[in-house]
């Protein structure tokens, strides 16, 4: 059981420092007086804390606001260009590295495709990405954020298991810290995506939301009451290997009938390709083995029953899994991200329909499921958001 | 998004007051010096805070400990009899009221069986229970805790929907507060059971655990990082209406194939009774419609294949649902409570077996599923624990 400790003066001060920075971040442009009002801190405390942030270059003065009688107040904001973060998406098909500013904008990006590197080669590729991005950075680097598939212990920075990269018990965080001398945060890719969506995604924010990432695999990232929730072993949201109904296909995890064997993009495209071969009348064609979600969605739009069946089946299996997550957590906001978003509105409708009949109707009816922004950099941006959060306290995530 | 506010001196003081009380509660018998060491507070602060708790009668001095050189220190504990809480279990078949001490011991209990009272009659029954228990209390009453099936908003004390009691949007908390002039906490019965198990159940505590209550319905109570987690609308853990595989039985919620139609005690006993009628060779007999989980478990022990099939099927459906909850939350400790515990070790084995093949093996293998204590008062005790927690801060639950 976690040991409680007293609230000390230093903790209070550090807390208030992050509180002021976060308040300016969330409400910019804003004045010292407004920050004092919103936080309940005295004007003197706010001025001291703001001065420190000005000296560190994190906050800047951006003109004067409207006067409410006296002198017009100086307005403040967090300078988005004060720092850059190196965000990495260690994907299953490519490695993406990005320089990300404090508002989640990608300033530069690098993409390295690869063909199943060894565990050591994969680590070397990451070092090269970091070195290259660091050289081209135009601002001080705050640190490195990494999103990777698989089971990750965020606290120790260890990748327990990433099947496609052949990583087992790899201390990636400590390795990067040692080589580059920068703070490092590592998270599962779905967790990173959830943080990106929570901090930079939808304009209307909810306290709690679940982001479901559907690509080569299926995983969820969970934000509860403003914090990224990662679970006892940082494996929260590993729903890709929950059993899907009526299925017996073998899964790469060694089990059978997992959700990923029905609802992942990989599974859906394999099924579409198989049906395209066996049904000559289908509008689906896969001469080069390069069917995409958009191509399947397009065939479905043009009335192709085969394409519709593929989309509906994958969407329904995902909807059933979401019903389970929604029922367990009572979170009413879900955002779908990843390459599966290319399956479009029909897929979303299938997810919603199955959710409605697989959970208590009263709850399902008030659950909002949306397609997220389809940025291919969501994991890199989210990984940088985690680092930003830890170093500056810009969100409540840990 | 929740508004952050500053950490004030008063908040720090209130926090430290609860911290001292909780530290004494968790480590009794203990001394002022040990409390200072464990909390990091100064001895002077601890002495002041302890004096207040002594004056309130919450803490008592219980002799002297071993000397480590100087004078032997005075030992402290929270007096379990300092207060009593009225804990109510508004069940689907009986109403139970109990006077509970600060250690979760039931000092007195009252049970009222009923046959489907009207919504108003049910509320009157509760008032009668409270009035009666209050009269017979021998200690100051701290407040009233209520556990009820259905959808409950803990914050406002409203029961949104309790199908068996015909309650809809009932402001039960305010009604009880107004009539009895005492603080009231209301929670879903599975949430209350989880808090009882977390605070008073297993000796080895985990930070996070999920309690699955299987009786007339199926529901989960979730403790995350030492806090009762209730979700956006206090409906976390409503897993009874998640779809169970391959099933099409109608559910009382209006849907079909819900987990409750396969895995609840009601469903399992109905199935057992049906099979007992159709299979004359079965050891199961149900002449009076009063088959119990223990009777089915007994028949299974004696080799009856029908009884075994009933237990295995219900257990497997539950195991699949638990796999979903475990995968979403990455909580590795599950405790099963409720009348289904009477199905015994064979049922537990079926749950564990299905969990193992319905989730990532690496996670399932380190997940601990146990039968909880089978006290029939677990909901009343848990509801009182919630009240105790809110009024005194004895756990981190909110």
Image: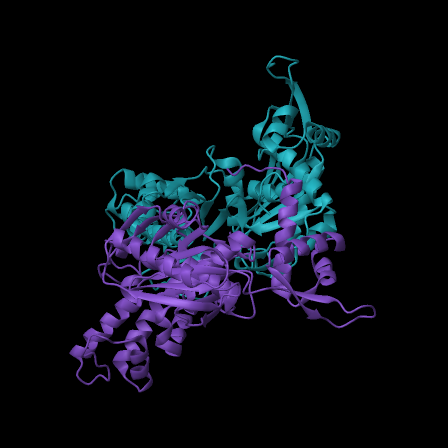
Chain colours: A purple, B cyan
Residue A209: x and y, percent? 50, 62
Numbered marks: total? 0
Looking at this view, is A173 or B227 the one in front?
A173
Residue B49: x and y, percent? 71, 32
Looking at this view, is B368 or B138 the one in front?
B368
Looking at this view, is A234 or A183 the one in front?
A183
Residue A35: x and y, percent? 70, 60
Quarter of the figure with residue A278: bottom left
**Which residue is found at the position 44% from the left and 39% from the top?**
B372
Residue found at the far right of this picture: A69
Residue A90 is left or right of residue B39, and the answer is left
Residue A53: x and y, percent? 63, 56
Vertical side of A85 occupied by B52: above or below:
above
Q: Is residue B150 visible?
A: no
Quarter of the figure with residue A338: bottom left
**Which residue is found at the position 27% from the left and 49% from the top?**
B309
Residue found at the far bottom of this picture: A302
Vertical side of A184 occupied by A38: above or below:
below
Q: Is residue B211 visible?
A: yes
Residue B181 is left or right of residue A307, and the answer is right
Quarter of the figure with residue B4: bottom right
Looking at this view, is B226 or A18 the one in front?
A18
């Amino acid at each position: 059981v976690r040991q409680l400790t007293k609230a000390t003066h230093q903790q209070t001060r550090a807390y208030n420092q992050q509180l002021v920075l976060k308040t300016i971040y969330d409400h910019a442009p804003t004045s010292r007086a407004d920050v004092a009002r919103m936080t309940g801190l005295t004007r003197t405390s706010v001025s001291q804390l703001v001065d420190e942030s000005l000296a560190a270059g994190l906050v800047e003065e951006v003109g004067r606001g409207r006067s409410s009688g006296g002198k017009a107040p100086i307005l403040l904001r967090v300078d988005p260009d004060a720092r850059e973060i190196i965000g990495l998406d260690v994907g299953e098909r490519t490695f993406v590295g990005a320089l990300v500013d404090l508002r989640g904008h990608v300033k530069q990006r690098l993409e390295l495709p690869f063909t199943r590197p060894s565990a050591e080669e994969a680590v070397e590729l990451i070092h090269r990405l970091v070195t290259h991005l660091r050289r081209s950075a135009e601002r001080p680097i705050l640190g490195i954020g990494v999103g990777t598939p698989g089971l990750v212990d965020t606290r120790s920075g260890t990748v327990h298991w990433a099947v496609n990269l052949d990583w087992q018990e790899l201390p990636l965080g400590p390795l990067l810290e040692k080589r580059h001398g920068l703070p490092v945060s590592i998270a599962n890719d779905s967790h990173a995506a959830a943080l990106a969506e929570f901090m930079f995604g939808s304009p209307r924010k909810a306290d709690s939301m679940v982001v479901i990432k559907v690509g080569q695999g299926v995983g969820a990232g969970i934000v509860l009451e403003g914090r990224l929730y990662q679970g006892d072993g940082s494996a929260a949201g590993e729903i890709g290997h929950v059993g899907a109904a009526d299925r017996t296909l073998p899964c790469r995890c060694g089990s059978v009938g997992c959700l990923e064997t029905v609802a992942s993009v990989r599974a859906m495209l394999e099924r579409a390709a198989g049906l395209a071969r066996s049904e000559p009348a289908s509008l689906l064609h896969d001469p080069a083995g390069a069917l995409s979600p958009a191509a399947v969605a397009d065939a479905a739009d043009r009335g192709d029953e085969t394409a519709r069946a593929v989309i509906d089946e994958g969407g329904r299996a995902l909807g059933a899994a979401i019903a389970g997550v929604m029922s367990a957590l009572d979170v009413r906001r879900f955002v779908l991200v990843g390459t599966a978003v290319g399956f479009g509105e029909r897929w979303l409708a299938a997810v919603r329909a199955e959710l409605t009949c697989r959970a208590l109707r009263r709850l399902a009816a008030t659950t909002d499921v949306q397609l997220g922004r389809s940025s291919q950099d969501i994991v890199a941006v989210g990984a940088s958001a985690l680092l930003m959060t830890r170093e500056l306290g810009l969100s409540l995530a840990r």
